[in-house]
Image (cartoon, rainbow, N blue to C red):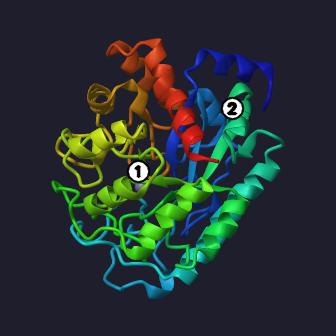
Amino acid sequence: MEGGFVGRMTDTLLPIFDGHNDVLLSVYGWPRAEARSLFARGEKGHLDLPRAREGGFVGGFFAVWVPPDPAARRPDLRPGAEDPEGAEQGLDVLPPAVPQAFALRMAMSLSATLFRLEAESSGGFEVVRDVAQLRRCLDSSTVAAILHFEGAEPIDPELNALEVFYRAGLRSLGLVWSRANAFAEGVPFQFPSSPDTGPGLTPAGKDLVQACNRMGIMVDLSHLNERGFWDVAEISKAPLVATHSNAHALTATPRNLLDTQLAAIRDSGGVVGVNFAVQFSREDGRREPDTPISALVRHFAYLCDRMGPDHVAFGSDFDGATIPDEIHDAAGLPRLVEALRAAGFDEATLRKLGHENWLRVLGQTWK
Ligand SMILES: [Zn+2]
């Protein structure tokens, strides 16, 4: 696994540190699916360590996403509602909130899954807690994982869970997935729509952002509605970050960012990770796997034009979204990089997009 062949292969690839994946849920085996291995090269899903090494995926944010509580499940929900990127009943309606106790149990299970993977990896996979450790991983063939919560449902209003999970390794927190919780409200998935779909942060949400600043936990704005976004922009002392969102001007889903939001992220020194989800990339917002890579290239180009190359990165959403067939999985990342090169992105820009921008932002955010 750590042989020289892999080392040489990696040297020829653009190293990509990635803003978002949902592989933990697949490895844990939720809800009915057979658990997948992170260590064996699979055909299912998008990400495992062999395919990561083939594609130049050197690490990323590994999401703890809390599925709907089966005990609280409404009988009218369609099957498929567990899908992390939508396909809910009625796309204009927010998926139901989940109780904190259930969310905390799931966060324990998925965080434990991440730590077990690290322990079983014989040094091939590390949970990183500071930038020096992240750099060491990038300089070796160790895949680096950031523990990230996609939605703050596991956190109690007293922030006790935040304290404990920080000490365990939590370094990134999305205030919401696309639902409401005690802190903020996410956007639904209807198309087309503005992201201005609901109220801003609650008082507890504002406290949470300040606590994250204090502790050095990155706050992720993806899935947050527009009023919540501006609340965070006003409160947060850290660079503004959306780990897996695209440009609303090209694809008018509420999951994407308005030009005004992109400007605020740029001015804060932050970054946007480009999401590979086809329905956030195509002009018509449809979930068609035969979407060409050029749809993603357009978003990379637009974001770079608007914000400059210091503020754009990758945010694949591997194992959480329908991505273009042409990319297929993590091993297909070089096809996207090649398309970016063909569109005129030079090597210095590609290195920024690939990992340098993430390193800068995390260095400014983590203590
Ligand atoms: Zn997401």
Image quarter (top left, top right, bottom left or bottom right) of the N terminus: top right
Confirm if mark 2 falls within 8 A of ligand 1: no
> x and y percent of residue 200 in the render?
30, 68
Q: Are marks 2 and 1 in contact (CB under 8 Å)?
A: no
Give me the disc on residue 321.
Answer: 1
Going by the numbered disc 1, the residue's amino acid type is Ala
Give me the disc on residue 313.
Answer: none
In front here: 5 or 225?
225
Residue drawn at 38 percent across, 36 percent down: 325
Q: CA distance from mark 2 to mark 1?
A: 28 Å
- Viewed as shown, does residue 54 lie left or right of 291? right
> x and y percent of residue 245 in the render?
35, 46
Residue drawn at 79 percent across, 19 percent down: 4
Tag nearer the camera, 2 or 1: 2
- Number of numbered tags placed on the structure image: 2
Mark 1 element type = loop
- Is tag 2's residue or tag 1's residue first in the polypeptide sequence? 2
Mark 1 surroundings: few (<14), some (14-19) or many (≥20) residues within 10 A: many
**Can you say whether 287 is above or below 200 in the image?**
above
* Disc 2 target residue: 135
Confirm if mark 1 falls within 8 A of ligand 1: yes
